[in-house]
Amino acid sequence: FEDRRGFTVRTIENMELKAAVEMGRQKIFSIKSLYQDQSSPYPGAVTHSVQCPEKLLPRFVSDEKASDARLRVETFANARKTLGVCVLDAVRFRYFLEMFYCPNLRMAVQVEAFIPHEQPLPEELSRVRCAATKATEKMQRE
């Protein structure tokens, strides 16, 4: 579901921890691949590769060994909410992703948000926990 602030919360029930960890690894791989150095598409270019500036690279925090296998990513997106932005002038949003596992519920949770880049990340994003997720699901069903 998506709430009024534009946060998207997805849950996958009946999932084992191992599968949740693998899902997180795949997400990291997908995002990192957007920022890899690439050969210049133009013959005779001044540089042989196209690189993303350090300040626009994604920041990853993950702890696969924690009981909730938490993963957090922060990076930037363009006006179409596309990741992989490597030109400062194209940045329009800050992208936030947090994935974690709820062992007691056997459920994986993904919280995602695109926030206008000049605004700070809302504190609520880092407060989503397993109990809050279950309560939210209950409200959605009613």
Image (tube, rainbow, N blue to C red):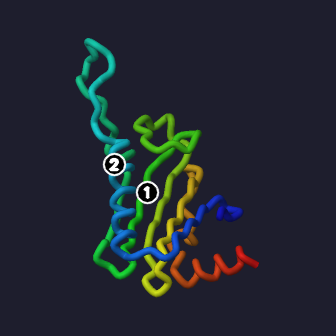
Instruction: Tell me the tag on residue 74.
Output: 1
Q: Is residue 24 above or below residue 106?
A: above
Q: Secondary structure at mark 1?
A: strand
Rendered location of residue 13, percent (x, y) = 52, 74
Mark toward the start of the polypeptide (1 vs 2): 2
Compared across the picture, whether 16 is left or right of 119 comes to left
Q: Is residue 72 above or below residue 40?
A: below
* Residue drawn at x 51%, y 52% as measured from the top left: 94
* Residue drawn at x 50%, y 53% as measured from the top left: 95
Q: Do the residues under discs 1 and 2 have CB atoms within 8 angstroms?
A: no
Kind of residue at disc 1: Glu
* Residue drawn at x 43%, y 57% as measured from the top left: 74
- Residue farthest to the top, as pictured: 44
Rendered location of residue 11, percent (x, y) = 54, 70
- Gap in Å between the C-alphas at discs 1 and 2? 12 Å
**Residue holding disc 2:** 32
Q: Residues within 10 Å of mark 2 (few under 14, many from 20)?
A: some
Compared across the picture, whether 18 is left or right of 76 comes to left
Q: Is residue 36 above or below residue 129?
A: above
Q: Quadrant of residue 22?
A: bottom left
In this rendering, which labeled residue sits more in front, label 1 or label 2?
2
Front residue of this view, candidates 136 and 121: 136
Which quadrant, please, contains the N terminus? bottom right
Compared across the picture, whether 60 is left or right of 74 comes to left
- Residue farthest to the left, as pictured: 48
Q: Quadrant of residue 86?
A: top left
Q: Secondary structure at mark 2?
A: helix
Rendered location of residue 117, percent (x, y) = 54, 49
